[in-house]
Image (cartoon, rainbow, N blue to C red):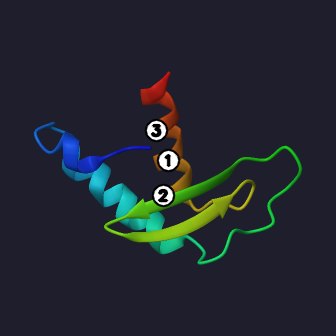
Amino acid sequence: MIDTDSAQGAADAPQWHSLAEQALREGAAEPPSGVPDGFRYTLTVDGRTVHAADPRLGEAQRELFRRVLKEGA
């Protein structure tokens, strides 16, 4: 989970929010089938939730999830 509201003072907060908005547009209303052992993601931005799954991630989704996983490491 990433909360961009809590990162408002961060220098890169606008980039995070923009990337999240792009990833939201690439998402699906229902969870996609994905593949066995693939990751599934749920993204909520400003109260709107979408779903995504490997290997069919959009470019913005892939970058956002990569950044989130990197930040959490």
Q: Gap in Å between the C-alphas at discs 1 and 3?
A: 9 Å
Name the residue type under label 1: Glu
Where is residue 66? Give x, y as percent: 53, 39
> In this figure, which residue is indicated by the disc labeled 3?
68
- For this view, does 66 lie left or right of residue 56? left
Name the residue type under label 3: Val
Q: Which residue reaches farthest bottom?
A: 29
The residue shown at (53%, 56%) is 61
The answer to whether residue 53 is above or below residue 3 is below
- For this view, does 36 lie left or right of residue 2? right
The answer to whether residue 23 is above or below residue 38 is below
Name the residue type under label 2: Ala
The answer to whether residue 27 is above or below residue 68 is below
Where is residue 17? Give x, y as percent: 28, 56
Q: Secondary structure at mark 3?
A: helix
Pointers 1 and 2 in contact (CB under 8 A)?
Answer: yes
Q: Gap in Å between the C-alphas at discs 1 and 2?
A: 5 Å
Q: Secondary structure at mark 1?
A: helix
- The numbered dot on residue 63 is 1
- The numbered dot on residue 55 is none
The residue shown at (46%, 27%) is 72
Q: Gap in Å between the C-alphas at discs 2 and 3?
A: 12 Å
Q: Secondary structure at mark 2?
A: helix
Q: Residues within 10 Å of mark 1 (few under 14, many from 20)?
A: some
Lower sequence index among marks 1 and 3: 1
Where is residue 41? Give x, y as percent: 61, 54
Mark 1, mark 3: which one is toward the viewer? 3
Where is residue 8? Give x, y as percent: 14, 45
> In this figure, which residue is indicated by the disc labeled 2?
60
